[in-house]
Amino acid sequence: MSRFLTDSKSLLVKYVPGEQPKRGEFIKLNTNESPFPLPKKAILGVADIAAEVNIYNDTGCTALTEAFAKYYDVGQENVIFSNGSDEVLAFCYLAFCNSKRDEFCGDKTIIYPEITYGFYRVFSQLFEVGAKEIPLKEDFSININDYIGANCTVLLANPNAPTGIALSCEEIEQIIIGNPNNIVIIDEAYAAFGATSVMQLTKKYKNLIVVGTFSKSRSMAGARLGYAVADAELIDDLNRIKFSFNPYNVNSMTQFLGRISIEDVDYYNDCITKIITEREKFTEKLNSLGFKTLPSKANFVFTKHPTISGEELYNRLREDKILVRRFDGTHIKDYLRISIGTASEMQLVVTSLEKIING
Ligand SMILES: *Cc1c(COP(=O)(O)O)cnc(C)c1O
């Protein structure tokens, strides 16, 4: 750390991304990527786009926006794209937190669960936004009453991470109605895997922002594409931030890949179906081996063995070249978060776990 770094930044605790080992070294089930590549048409077509990168990219993401608006049945003025969804979440912090509207919340101006996506805490620190972190219930679910009448910005991942547990559309609607003077942000990074998206509610509620990503369900983690859907005025606010920070945030290759991903509906649906099928099969297998697995609507499961510690399981799987994720923290230290890969990958995980458990 240099002596020039500002005092507040010197206290930042950085986000720790999951390990990205050399390709092929591990069965990689630690960062919830899709095991399936993009459709061939996307991969082959990107060279033509790369041939034109001497010219700046389209700041309005026009073709991508058209395809997205049509597929998801929202207005083109209701969408903004970003360099991964982490970026649009940052725009939300900059645009909507610490506003006058948050005055009833004292110095706490955003609320989210204590156990959730780790980046929320990092952003709260970076943008110096006071955060209320609310414990989950005993069963790791969210108590919606904690978020009704919050009087500050509400931020929830649905399904939540790393639990995989989803709220219903009706429960989220109660939270939106319960916070008429504040923004409610629903992060739907994993919604495609079985939760109900509340995207259509953005037409009804002017305080709702639905954030999503192409990283998990659309096989584009390395291309970086995220989005927010909301009332046009809110999108305008977010564009004010985007154009004050990095107007060219989504590069032309990524815009192209995103558009092809949306247009190839059959391929996308096929990938999602495979993941959901594998998740259900794998969950059943884990539970038959004695694991306690939370009910997941995501492309990962959060699971714990009654006697073998999370650390030991993690290390033993790693010896078998299987990489999963675990977290420190009193309530979750013995859980593993295992991304759902292909059928053959999950079979190898099962074989390895059987070996570990049966000594
Ligand atoms: C992975 C993830 C994101 C961010 O994904 P990007 O790759 O930045 O688009 C956002 N929210 C949650 C809950 C996630 O798990």
Image: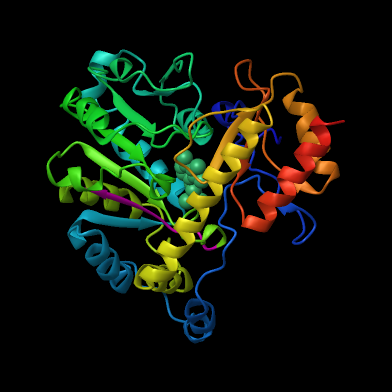
Residue 299, how many percent across, how many down?
52, 46
Q: Quadrant of the N terminus?
A: top right
Q: Quadrant of the C terminus?
A: top right
Residue 307, how many percent across, how many down?
75, 19
Dividing the picture into quadrants, the one containing residue 147 is: top left
Dividing the picture into quadrants, the one containing residue 159 is: top left
Foreground pick, 315 / 234: 315
Residue 11, how many percent across, how many down?
61, 25
Residue 257, how many percent across, how many down?
45, 71
Vertical order, 18 against 22 (above or below): above
- Magenta span dominant secondary structure: strand
Dividing the picture into quadrants, the one containing residue 290 is: top right
Q: Residue furthest front?
A: 288
Q: Who's the residue at 44% across and 69% down the image?
A: 267
Q: Give the number of marks.
A: 0
Q: Is residue 88 left or right of residue 116?
A: left
Chain part drawn in magenta: 223-230
Q: How is the image coloured?
A: rainbow
